[in-house]
Image (tube, grey):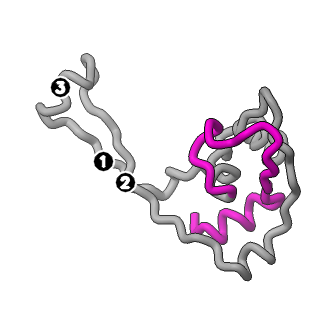
Amino acid sequence: MNRYTRATQIRNVGSYYRELRRGRRRIVHYDVLEMKNPTFRDRVNLKTTTHIWKYGDRLYKLADQYYGDPEYWWVIAWYNATPTEVALKTGQVIRIPLSLTAVLSVLGV
């Protein structure tokens, strides 16, 4: 299950997007998901491991390593309040939630 599984799909066929569609009949947009921030109690109850960010690291690689699916890179980014890898510096310690099911439950996804 990815983060868009429960998101509302908006199929855009309006003339405004004709040039962007590049010959396609429609563009599919997803409604913005509302994810809650975990409370202190939520964070305490989530088991995590630490990872020291090094040159060559990628969030999708860590997601594949810990969750078996690179599409969950956004869970690690969200948990560490880093929208992209550019925000991470070499030597920075990040936390990785170990139970994907538990962290998705906390997020409400």
User: Which residue is the site of mark 3?
Assistant: 18
Q: Which mark is residue 31?
A: 2
Lower sequence index among marks 1 and 3: 1
Residue 18 in which image quadrant: top left
Q: Which mark is residue 108?
A: none
* Cα separation between marks 1 and 3: 15 Å
- Asked whether the residues under the numbered discs 1 and 2 touch, taking CB atoms below 8 Å apart as contact, a structural biologist would say yes
In which quadrant will I find the C terminus?
bottom right
Q: Is residue 77 magenta?
A: no
Could you tell me the amino acid type at mark 1? Answer: Ile
Could you tell me the amino acid type at mark 3? Answer: Arg
The structure residue drawn at horizontal position 75% and vertical position 58%, both measured from the top left corner, is 100
Q: Position of residue 94 (x, y in %)?
A: 78, 52
Image side of residue 30 versus residue 87, left or right? left
Q: Which mark is residue 10?
A: 1
Q: Secondary structure at mark 1?
A: strand
Residue segment shown in magenta: 80-109
Could you tell me the amino acid type at mark 2? Answer: Asp
Of all residues, the one furthest to the left in this rendering is 15
Lower sequence index among marks 2 and 3: 3
* Cα separation between marks 1 and 2: 7 Å
Q: Nearer the viewer, residue 50 or 8?
A: 50
Rendered view: 5 above or below 17: below
